[in-house]
Amino acid sequence: MKTFLFTCLSLFICIQLHAQNHEESNYDEAKVPTYTLPDVLKTRDNKTVSSKKVWEKNRRPEILALFEDHIYGQVPKSFEDIRFSVISETKNSMNGKSNRKEILIEVFNQGKSVRINLVLFIPNNATKPSPVFLLINNRGKENTDPSRKIISEFWPAEVLIDAGYAIAAFHVSDLAPDNKDEFMNGVMQLYPEQLKADNGMRAIGAWGWGASRVMDYFETESQIDIKRVALVGHSRGGKASLWAAAQDQRFAICITNCSGSTGAALARRQFGERVRRINTSFPHWFNANYKKYNDHEALLPVDQHMLISLIAPRPVYATNASEDLWADPKGTFLSLKNAEGVYGLFGLKSNLPEVAPGLNTPLIESPLAYHNREGKHDMTVYDWKQFIKFADFHFGMGR
Ligand code: GTR
């Protein structure tokens, strides 16, 4: 009898665990499993990293390769040619406050090319090259309307110009249409071998690659201060901004707004959107290897605090919205907290408290910054105003 009861109990526990493991999303803190994060400061051969030298030489490249192989895919570095053309320039846009430039960036490789359309506003009252915010636009193109007939909170260009910043944007569809059947009609054509590789580039990687090509253009633009480029992305765009800034150290600041699963939120918490769900809804975002972690987050060789760590010592600002549990605000804050050790190697102290701050309480004067805005999954003028304060602080704008 005892054995029978024991078998029944074990079976019951097994079924429960299985069911829990296969939930594609979770909004219940009680269902967050006990987890251990991979130690960002321990190399794969179990050596403790205690200096920035060892971090940069050994551990950082090791982690970068893990993210490439298991999640975002390779990032091709070479191409045959890149050309920049000024499509239009309007020196007195925004009632004379700004110079508007529309730039076409064309990149060529293996007989194919990709065309990135960049819109850029530069403050006219600048006396030296301007710091710039670059948005990876994953929403409708009207959000970054160059004519300013449509003024969207998602990209409040006038507010940035008034604050002394240049502001730029490109659309993700120029790099990889955001659709499982069409994502290959862009950058992927320049690197056809990527499609065949289990660790090949996919849409999020392509969008990040695009941000780096814009950076290539900024390096030729005398009105832009290339040492002060802040990369911004919202949600899926925020996953791309993190990955691009992790890869490309020319980005001085990274802002990731409501980026959630496979963005700034810890995977092992299995809270909000889980790996299976994101891989099923958006199979074109991440590489083939990532699918192995559907229902198996604990087996990932990395977690998202390590992605943030790759950006150290450069400042990272992650945000959430109170009604956006899908993007796991708590897991995002914990990601930042667990990256503190790497910033410490650079002598940088995070000012984040032990637990997440209350709503609408931005913690900005810190290399790892955070806020949780009241409201929905979105990027608003409120968010942008905090980004400006963050950049003011780190770029020493002294307002
Ligand atoms: C959701 C997706 C999220 C997030 C969001 C967005 O459907 O599940 O990971 O990327 O879209 O981009 O707005």
Image (cartoon, grey):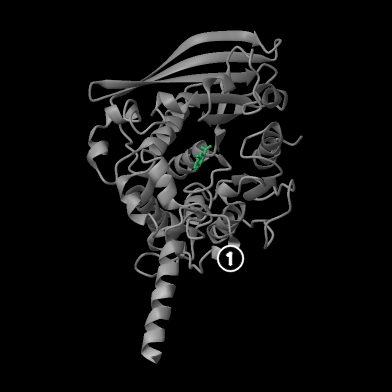
For label 1, the SS is helix
Seen in the picture, residue 300 relative to 325 is either above or below; the reply is below
Seen in the picture, residue 254 relative to 158 is either above or below; the reply is below
Q: In the orientation shown, which residue stands out farthest toward the bottom?
A: 2
Q: Residues within 10 Å of mark 1 (few under 14, many from 20)?
A: few
Q: What percent of the width, then of the height, locates residue 66?
A: 36, 54
Residue type at the position of mark 1: Ala
Q: What residue is shown at x 45% (from left), y 43% (from top)?
A: 243
Q: Quadrant of the N terminus?
A: bottom left
Taking the image as shown, residue 96 lies to the left or right of residue 291, namely right
Q: Nearer the viewer, residue 225 or 134?
A: 134
Q: What residue is shown at x 58% (from left), y 65% (from top)?
A: 30
Q: What residue is shown at x 42% (from left), y 54% (from top)?
A: 60
Q: Is residue 119 visible?
A: yes
Task: Answer with the quarter of the image where residue 10 lies.
Answer: bottom left
Residue bearing mark 1 = 30
Taking the image as shown, residue 89 lies to the left or right of residue 370, namely left
Q: Quadrant of the C terminus?
A: top right
> Does the closest atom of ligand 1 sit within 8 Å of the Cβ of label 1?
no
Q: What residue is shown at x 59% (from left), y 14% (from top)?
A: 100
Q: Nearer the viewer, residue 354 or 60?
A: 354
Task: Answer with the quarter of the image where residue 286 lies.
Answer: top left
Q: In the orientation shown, which residue stands out farthest toward the front?
A: 1
Seen in the picture, residue 165 relative to 370 is either above or below; the reply is above
Taking the image as shown, residue 236 lies to the left or right of residue 28, namely left
Taking the image as shown, residue 154 lies to the left or right of residue 44, namely right
Q: Is residue 301 visible?
A: no
Q: What percent of the width, then of the height, locates residue 111?
A: 23, 21
Q: What percent of the width, then of the height, locates residue 7?
A: 37, 82
Q: What percent of the width, then of the height, locates residue 143?
A: 58, 23
Q: In the orientation shown, which residue stands out farthest toward the right?
A: 399
